[in-house]
Image: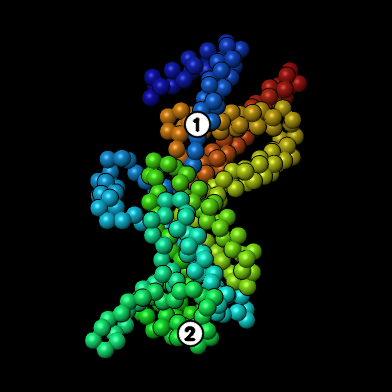
Amino acid sequence: MNVIKNQTHQIIRLIINYPKSFLIATILLTTLLAIGIKNLSISNDFRVYLSQDNPQLMAFEAFEDHYTKSDSATFVISPQKGQDLFSQRGLSLISQLTERAWLVESAYRVSSLSNYIYSKAQDDVILSDFLYSDPQQLTPAQIKVIRQTALSETRLVQSLMTADGKLTVIVINLRLNSSHPNASIEVTEEMEAIRNEFRQAYPEFQIENGGSTAFNTTLARAVAHDLTYLMPLSYLIIFSGLWFFLRSFWATASIFILITSCLVSTFGFFGWVWPVLTPIAGFAPSILLSIMVADSVHILVSYFHEIEKGTARKKGH
């Protein structure tokens, strides 16, 4: 303990004796670390939480290689008030959106009402066919049969449609590039563009996005939103409070410079050694901000207190 204390005292003496040299060295080090920020990216892939040699991750990836990928994107369709999913317009929307879904990047399978294959027995023959085709040519009687057939298919109701027939999903299974950290975001942006296109063509239906890609992208966007809007707001509130309580522009400015330098250095360091951040890293600036403000205020208050004591002694003499 004494060794550490002596070393600390020696460092403090060096800083006091050579303040300009340490200031220049600090600025150069901060600048060097800050350059690493350009390498940073936020990944929404759960794999970034685990090492490449993690046995559970390796087993999971081996399972996906032998069977199927678990990534998915979905369109969720429901009629607006007074509309019906089982109508020419509703079935046409499902059919057209299903065809468009096949063109989504990395898609290898699309499941929906329009390509659902059901089987029925006719005499001694088992017939298999799509639930419906060419929705524009369907009559009300045929649509009624399609509704009854769909609602009677337990496997269909449990996977692609609600039991009341008021909501359906189009499920797109994906083979995302695991080496590409923003693959989910790119797929989600493509899905949103398709969604907006069909919303204009079918305003009487509500179309939303879902699936694992949408979930991952929403989490990444939430972190980006916090960094973009909450951090500046936190800065404004904190430094308004510091200005009000410390009553010193230079004290407030010094804390601002210190905190900014520490944040830039910290994330720049990660940019050099581990450039792919997880969404959880978005909480780091707020945590660092709280700790640095508390320590800085504590040091400055002690500094001002000692100055006042010294001034009072001088007046006393």
| Viewer-proximal residue among 131 and 213 | 131
Other-residue count near label 2 (Cα within 10 Å), few / some / many at <14 / 14–19 / ≥20: few
Q: Which mark is residue 110?
A: none
Applied colour scheme: rainbow
Which numbered disc, 2 or 1, marks the residue that appears first in the sequence? 1
- Viewer-proximal residue among 30 and 66: 66
Q: Examine the image and state in which quarter residue 18 appears.
A: top right
> 29 or 3: nearer the eye?
29
Extreme front residue here?
137
Percent x, y of residue 128: 32, 76
Looking at the image, residue 103 lies above or below residue 317 = below
Relative to 20, say whether 166 is above or below: below
Which residue lies at the image location 45% right of the left edge and 71% below the top edge?
A: 114
Q: Amino acid at mark 2?
A: Gln
Going by the numbered disc 1, the residue's amino acid type is: Asn
Rendered-image quadrant of the N terminus: top left
Q: Which mark is residue 39?
A: 1
The residue under the point 53% across, 86% down is 140
Label 1 packing within 10 angstroms: few (<14), some (14-19), many (20+): some
Please name the residue shown 62% across and 35% down the image: 297
Instruction: Tell me: residue 142, above or below residue 6.
Output: below
Q: Quadrant of the C terminus?
A: top right
Badge 2 element: helix
State which quadrant residue 156 falls in: bottom left
Residue 312 is left or right of residue 178, and the answer is right
The residue sitting at 59% across, 16% down in the picture is 23
* Disc 2: which residue: 142
Up/down of 294 relative to 72, above or below: above
